[in-house]
Image (tube, rainbow, N blue to C red):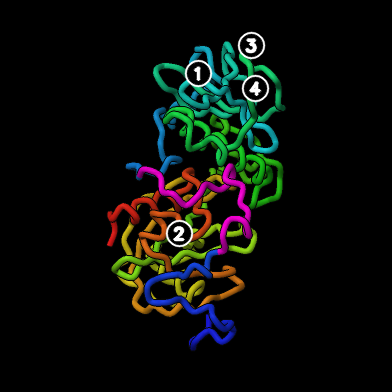
């Protein structure tokens, strides 16, 4: 991050005091976006918690230590393929996960917990047209259907994807390099040479809406995103750093402004592959953006009205993300 003004700014890219201008945001005909992937800027109804933070099952932490976590009961098993998609049925009330009904815990299954006396587990497997005699309408991932699932399915799917990702990325001990053995119903990998237990890890990341204390907030975009899509700023927490410190550092690195009044909002699992998103809002001390183009492609100030009416960026993050959750709550006036 430069200590002075950003010297690479092109003529005309400064942001006016009221927010962005029409020229800042090309019309849809110039920057087509597939709305199936990235919804339009119209805000959704703010929810109490981010959609991927919902859960309606008991993870059964102590039960994992049993030789049979299902304790002899039939198990509903969710199959996760190598693309991290799962079988989905389009029910009258929305999408539902399709579970394989098994008489007991399958070999190699990962225990997810139970709900209403029914044990659930996940296995890695291949796609099929039917599961336990039920038709599969599609194989879809957490990004595609996570926001539309019920609380039970959403919580089980986020957990299943996260633990499967951990297994795929940690098949060898970080201490000896030996292939690990799986224990505790899939929640521990043991180093056979040292005997050390290796547990699932989650990478903490901060995601923050920076506002001016009034009616504007900063949104940025990465070059790899669809044209016209903007979101709030984010970054990983570094070793020895608090989450609040990471917020201040990441904002300074990405857009060159200092912040104060850093406040926690909510958190959400984001198993792509293994993050926990910690959501914050923060107030900007200064207004001039000095963009680090190695971090993000561009960033601009937008007003609440621009986001509310769709006159700002062409696309906002999908409802499945905590970014959209925070944006919607700010637009609704919850943060100032």
Q: Give me the residue at 40% from left, 36% from top.
A: 54
> Taking 257 as reference, is 159 left or right?
right
Q: Quadrant of the C terminus?
A: bottom left
Q: CA distance from mark 2 to mark 4?
A: 54 Å
Q: Give me the residue at 35% from left, 61% from top.
A: 281
Q: Nearer the viewer, residue 78 or 73?
A: 78
Describe the element under mark 1 as helix, strand or loop.
loop
For residue 311, which numbered disc appears in the image?
2
* Front of the two marks 3 and 4: 3
Tell me, yes or no, whether the highlighted magenta stretch contains residue 29. yes
Q: Nearer the viewer, residue 271 or 189?
A: 271
Report the predominant secondary structure element of the magenta stretch: loop
x, y percentage for residue 44? Answer: 40, 44
Which segment did they paint magenta? 26-45
Describe the element under mark 2 as helix, strand or loop.
loop
Query: Dividing the picture into quarters, in which one does residue 244 lie?
Result: bottom left
x, y percentage for residue 299? Answer: 51, 69
The answer to whether mark 1 and mark 2 are in CB contact below 8 A is no
Q: CA distance from mark 1 to mark 2?
A: 53 Å
Q: CA distance from mark 1 to mark 4?
A: 12 Å
Relative vertical location of residue 278 with respect to residue 82 in this rendering, above or below: below
Mark 1, residues whose alpha carbon is within 10 Å: few (<14), some, or many (≥20)? many
For residue 70, which numbered disc appears in the image?
1
The first of marks 1 and 2 along the sequence is: 1
Tell me, yes or no, whether the highlighted magenta stretch contains residue 3. no
């Amino acid at each position: 991050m430069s200590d002075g003004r950003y010297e690479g700014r092109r003529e005309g890219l400064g942001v006016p005091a009221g927010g962005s201008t029409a020229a800042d945001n090309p019309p849809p005909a110039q920057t087509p976006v597939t709305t199936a992937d990235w919804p339009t800027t119209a805000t959704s109804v703010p929810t109490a918690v981010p959609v991927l933070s919902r859960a309606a099952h008991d993870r059964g932490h102590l039960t994992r230590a049993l030789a049979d976590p299902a304790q002899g009961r039939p198990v509903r098993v969710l199959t996760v393929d190598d693309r991290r998609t799962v079988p989905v049925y389009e029910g009258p009330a929305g999408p539902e996960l399709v579970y394989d009904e098994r008489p007991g815990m399958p070999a190699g299954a990962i225990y997810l917990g139970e709900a209403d006396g029914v044990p659930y587990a996940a296995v890695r497997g291949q796609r099929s047209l039917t599961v336990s005699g039920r038709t599969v309408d599609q194989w879809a991932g957490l990004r595609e259907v996570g926001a539309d699932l019920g609380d039970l399915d959403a919580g089980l799917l986020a957990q299943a994807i996260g633990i499967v990702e951990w297994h795929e990325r940690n098949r060898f001990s970080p201490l000896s390099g030996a292939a690990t053995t799986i224990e505790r119903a899939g929640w521990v990998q043991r180093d056979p040479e040292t005997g050390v237990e290796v547990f699932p890890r989650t990478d903490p990341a901060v995601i923050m809406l920076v506002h001016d204390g009034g009616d504007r907030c900063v949104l940025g975009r990465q070059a790899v995103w669809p044209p016209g899509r903007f979101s709030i700023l984010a970054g990983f927490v570094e070793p020895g750093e608090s989450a609040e410190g990471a917020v201040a550092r990441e904002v300074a690195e990405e857009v060159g402004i200092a912040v104060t009044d850093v406040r926690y909002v909510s958190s959400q699992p984001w198993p792509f592959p293994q993050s926990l998103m910690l959501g914050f809002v923060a107030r900007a001390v200064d207004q001039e953006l000095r963009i680090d183009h190695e971090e993000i492609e561009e960033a601009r100030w937008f007003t609440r009205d621009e986001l509310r009416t769709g006159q700002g960026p062409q696309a906002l993050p999908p409802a499945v993300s905590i970014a959209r959750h925070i944006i919607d709550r700010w637009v609704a006036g919850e943060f100032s």
